Amino acid sequence: MTNIKHSPMSKEIFILAVILVLAGWGCGTKGSAANTAAAVTATHYQLATVEKASGLEQLVKLPAQLAAYEEVSIFPKVNGYVKRVWVDIGSHVKKGQLLMELEAPELEQASMQAKEKYARATLDYTISRENYERLRQAALTPGAVSPMGLASAKAKEEADSTLCNAEKANWQMQETILGYLRVAAPFDGVITERNVHPGALVSAEGKDNKPMLDLRQVERLRLQVDIPEGIAANLEDKDTVTFYLSAFPGKKMTGRVSRRSSVVNTQYRSERMELDVYNQDGKLAPGMYGDILFHSKGNPAAFSVPRSAVITSTERKYVLSVRDGKTVKVDVTTGNDTADKVEVTGALQAGDELVVNANDETKEGLTVK
C-alpha cells in the first residue's frame, strides 16, 4: 500500500479554492435577487384612450310599488252613534253613494231651534217692512208723519233684516252640521277598511281613533319609483317604462312617466316619479311590489372610459391621465355604465390617454413610456 502525503501547500490551495467557489455562488445569488426586485418594481402600465360617449345607454332596474290613485281615511266630523253601515270591506262604491249614517239627537234639536228662530225673525222683518212702507206712503202728505218717526221705522226695518239674515245663516249652518251624519263617498273606489258597527259611539275629537272607513281608488293606480338624480335628469315625461310585478312573475307591463316631484331627496339623492297604471280587470292592488326596467339615455356631454380606469378611494373618484409622459390624477363623476365602459365627466378631453390597470396605491408623477 502506498501512503500519499499531503504537503501544507496543497492544503492551502484546496482551502483557497473552496473560498473562491463560495464567494462566486454568493455573488450570483445577490445578483439574481437584485434582478428579481428590479423586475417587480418595473410595472407595465396599460393605456386606453378617452372617447366621446354621446349618451351611453344603460338598462336600469329599480324597485317600485303600486299605490292607489286616490285614497282617504274617513273620520267622523261630529260626535254621534253609528246608526247604519251600508258597506263593508271589498264594497265597490260610486262618488256620492251613501256609506253610513250616524245619529245625534242634540244636533237635530239644534237644527230645529235654529229653524224656528229664523222663522220668527222673518215674521218680525215682514212686520217692520210693512210698517215702514205705510209710514213712507203717509209721509207724502205734509205733516202726517214726523221725519223722526219715519227714520225710526227705517232703522227698525234694517235691524230686523240683519237679524233675519243672521238667523238664516245659523239655521243653514245647523243643517250643514246635521248633514255630517250622512257619510258619502268622495270618489269612486273600494272600501279597504271598516272599523265601526251600528251602535258604536264615534267622536270627532279623538286624536288616536281609527278611521271609520278607508276608501281607495283602484281602477287607476300609481306606480311609484325613486330614481337616482343622475338618471332622473335625463328622463323625460311620457318616456315609456317596462315593469314587472312580483305577484305576476314574467308578465311584462308598460307605462309612461306621468308625474315627477322635481325635488331631489337629500338623503337618498333620488327623485320620486310616478306612472299611471290602469286596472280595468281589478287584478292589481295597491301595495304590490315590482321592478321597473328602462333604458337610460345617458349624458351626451360625457366621455366613455374603461371601467377599470376609474379608481375609487375613500376620499375621491378619479382616473390617472398620462400628460407629458407623467401620471396625473383627474377627479371624475361617473354616470351610466355597461359591462366594460363607464361614463365620466371631468377635466378630460377626447383622445387623452388613461392608465387602465392602476389602483389607489399608484402614485402621481410616474413615468409612462
Image (tube, helix red, strand yellow):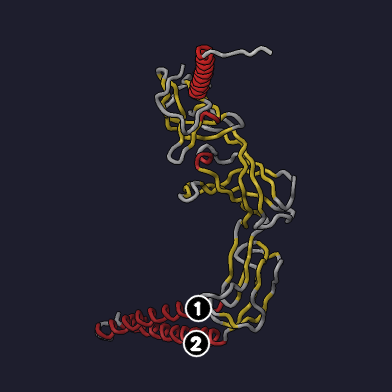
Name the residue: 51% across, 46% down. 270
Residue 235 found in image quarter = top right
Can residue 301 be seen in the rendering of this structure?
Answer: yes
Nearest the viewer among 362 and 145 is 362
Nearest the viewer among 8 and 109 is 8
Q: Residue furthest front?
A: 1
Q: Secondary structure at mark 2?
A: helix
36 vs 87: above or below: above
94 vs 273: above or below: below
Q: Secondary structure at mark 1?
A: loop
Measured as percent of width and height from the top left, residue 293 is found at 64, 41
In the drawing, does residue 140 fall left or right of residue 84? left
Residue 205: numbered disc: 1
Measured as percent of width and height from the top left, residue 234 is found at 52, 37
What kind of residue is marked 2? Answer: Gln
Name the residue: 29% across, 84% down. 152
Q: Which residue is mark 2?
A: 113
Measured as percent of width and height from the top left, residue 320 is found at 45, 27
Residue 295 found in image quarter = top right
In the drawing, does residue 213 fall left or right of residue 248? left
- Contact flag, marks 2 and 1 (Cβ < 8 Å): no
Category of crowding for the residue at label 1, using alpha-carbon neighbours closer than 10 angstroms: few (below 14), some (14–19), many (at least 20): few
331 vs 265: above or below: above
